Image (spheres, rainbow, N blue to C red):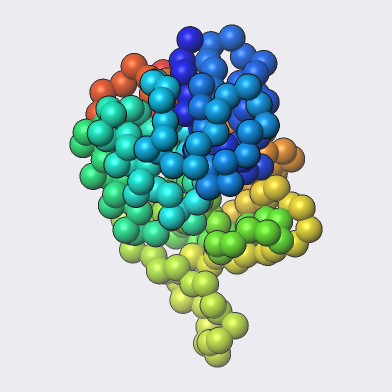
Amino acid sequence: MVKLLLVGACGKMGKVISNIVDNRGDCKVVCGVDAFGEKYSDFPVYKDFSEIDENPDVIIDFSHPSALKGLLKFASEKNIPAVIATTGLCEEHIEMINSASKKIPVFFTYNMSLGVNLLAELAKKATSVLSNDFDIEIIEAHHNQKIDAPSGTALMLADTINEELDNSYNYEFDRHSKSEKRPKKEIGLHAVRGGTIVGEHEIIFAGRDEIIKLSHSARSKEIFAVGAVNAAIYLKNQNQGIFNMSDLLSAK
């Protein structure tokens, strides 16, 4: 039985994870951390890491970037593996994660969905075949409460494609401000915000007289929660280092 500490326990994703764990027999949420400190289940919710009395095996983080520093400090001091699923992280946050991974196992990916990570693999293959003759654009759509744009997943997809291209392409986020033809070595990223869209990602390969599209549609937040819980189960028995969905899939 893997004992979980849920950071961001009172948020939407925190409550989804709690509900999913309640229906599993291989793990249990033993406590949560959330600035609001609302108790809604049979585990205690603390407002600060210093208040925790339990001894969790793994941390799952679906909170806010501002909580990352304290979370990683706590995890490193207590030698607890951490699954980082919070979005909107900047380069400074990534450096924190990389630094912590030298002491503890850290599972970090921009999207916990199996389908999205398969989409990234398909995009790599398509890029290797099509890049010389096709322009590449990425469109993402999310609910109207999402703060960051473009999404971390869209950036992950762009990075995956660009790695296949020896990181020789530039990202274009603001084409409307330019009056010029589209450069060849460019990946356009476009964000749509509206309603309750959970998450839509589409990669367009546009060539001469033909268009190829790869897409993924998330219909529920549960897919991200299930991925995070599976990552936590996997991470419990790992040594220090950075892990991602490819590692989890290889272990299956």
- From the viewer's perspective, is residue 195 above or below residue 9? below
Q: Look at 75% across and 62% down and name the residue there.
A: 194
Does residue 192 appear to the left or right of 5 in the view shown? Answer: right
**Residue 240, horizontal then vertical, whole percent:** 25, 29
Question: Quarter-wise, where is residue 12 in the image?
Answer: top right
Compared with 106, 195 (above or below) is below
Residue 11, compared with residue 240, is above or below; it is: below
Q: Nearer the viewer, residue 89 or 49?
A: 49
Query: How many numbered dots are placed on residues in this image?
Result: 0
Question: As rendered, which of 127 and 153 lies closer to the eye?
Answer: 153
Image coordinates of residue 196 in percent, x first then y, are 77, 53
Horizontal and vertical percent position of residue 88: 49, 56
Q: Is residue 129 visible?
A: no
Extreme-bottom residue of the structure: 179
Counting from the top left corner in percent of width and height, residue 98 is at 27, 44
Q: Farthest residue toward the left?
A: 102
Residue at horizontal 54 percent and vertical 17 percent from the top: 28
Q: Residue furthest right?
A: 195
Q: Residue at x 32, y 37 (%)?
A: 74
Q: Is residue 234 visible?
A: yes
Which residue is rendered at x = 45% and y = 68% of the image? 171
Q: Which is more toward the observer, 9 or 106?
A: 9
